[in-house]
Image: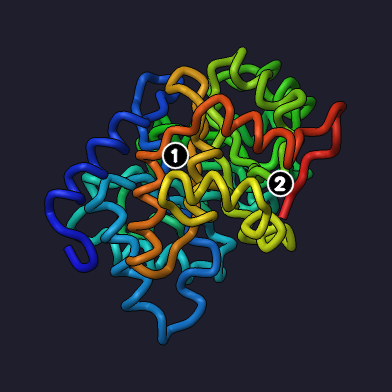
Amino acid sequence: MKGINDQEAEKIRTQLAARSVTLPDGTKVPAVGQGTWHMGDDPSKRKQEIEALRTGVDLGMVLIDTAELYGYGKSENLVGEAIRGIRDRVFLVSKAMPSHGSRKDLAAACERSLKQLGTDHLDLYLLHWKSSVPIEETIEGMEALKKSGKILRWGVSNFDTADMENLVSQPEGAHCTTNQVLYHLGSRGIEVDLLPWQRRHHMPIMAYCPLAEAGSLKRQLTSDTQVRRIAEAHHISPLQLLLAWCIRHTESDGIIAIPKASQAAHVIENARAAGVVLTEEEQHALDRAFPRPSSKVPLAIV
C-alpha cells in the first residue's frame, strides 16, 4: 500500500477492529469511518479521492458516509466508483434530503442513490435533517425500504434530544440505528443531554466534522497549547489528537467519527489515530481547555 508498509497496515487494521462500535442490531462498525462532503466536486481530484477512499477501506475504515445532497449526486457517484469490486467489504451510508421525507419521495430518492452508488442496497440510510413531512410518514417510508431490502437499517441526522424523543415515541421509531450530528472538541453541546440520551437508548452517535472541518474553530483547536502538548507526547499531529479525543469512549457507549480526507496520506493519518489512547490526565486537560457547556445549548448544525 502506498505510503505505509504491510506490517503497519496490519497493525492499524487490528487497532481499528479493537475500537469498533456496536449498532443496536449487534453489527460492529469501526469507530473511524470516512466522510465524503465536497468529494466529487472537482473532477481534477477524482482519481486522488478514489485512491483515498480505497486506502481507507484497505486499512479497515470500511464505513463510508455520503449523501444525495453532496454535489447533488457527485459524491455518491464518486463513492460508487471507489467501491466497485469491493462493495461487500464496505458499510455504506447515504442520506436523503428532508424534502424527500414522504414515503413516495423517500423511495425515489433511495433509488437514485442506489443507482449513483452502483449497488442494490444501503447498509444505513439517514434522513439528513428534520423534514416538514410528519416523522411518522418518514418512518413508514424507511421501514418499507427495509422490508424491500433496499436498505438494511435507517437513522437520522441533525436531530436534537426533543426530536429523538418524538421519534422513538412513534410506531417503529425505536428502530432508528443512529443520529449523525456535529461533534468535536470545540463543539461539545451534545454532551449535556443528547449524548446521554442516546446512550440510555443504546443508539450510537455518528460524529461529522470531528476535526472541526466546517467551522472557524479548527485553527484555534490545533494551535492550543494543551492540544499541541498532548499531541507531541503521543508523537501525533494536533488533528490526529482531535480524532483520538472524539473516539475516546468505550465500545458500549462509543462514537463513530467520520472525518473527510481526500488524500491517501491523510486517510492513513486518520486511521493511525485509532491506536491513540488518552490518559485521564490528558482528557481532563482538554476538558479544562475546551469545557463542555454547563447547560443545554441549541444543536450545532453545519
SS class, disc 1: strand
* Amino acid at circle 2: Gly
Residue at figure coordinates x 35%, y 48% from the top left? 272
Residue 89 shown left or right of residue 7 in the figure? right
Which part of the image, by quadrant, shows the C terminus? bottom right
Image location of residue 139, percent across then percent down? 60, 30
Residue identified by numbered label 2: 186
Instruction: Assign the N terminus to one quadrant of the image.
Output: bottom left
Q: In this view, does 95 lie to the left or right of 146?
A: right
SS type, badge 2: loop
Q: Using the rendered image of the protein, determine whether residue 31 is visible from the camera's viewpoint.
A: yes
Give the answer, above or below, for where 15 lies relative to 302: above
If you read the primary sequence from the N terminus, does the residue marked by circle 1 or circle 2 appear first? 1
Q: In which quarter of the image is residue 166?
A: top right
- Residue 227: image x %, image y %? 61, 48
On screen, 97 above or below 40? above
Q: Nearer the viewer, mark 1 or mark 2?
A: 2
Q: Residue at x 68, y 49 (%)?
A: 98
Q: Where is residue 80 in the image (x, y as percent from the top left)?
A: 33, 62
Q: Which of 164 and 62 is in front in this view?
A: 62
Gap in angstroms between the C-alphas marked 1 and 2 = 28 Å
Kindly identify which residue carries mark 1: 124
Camera-side residue: 269 or 52?
A: 269
Residue 107 visible in the picture: no
Residue 135 - label: none
Image side of residue 272 versus residue 156, left or right: left
Mark 2 closeness class: few <14, some 14–19, many ≥20 residues within 10 Å: some
Q: In this view, does 179 lie above or below 268?
A: above
Residue occupying the far top of the picture: 200
Q: Which amino acid does label 1 sit on?
A: Leu
Residue at the spot x=55%, y=39% of the render? 246
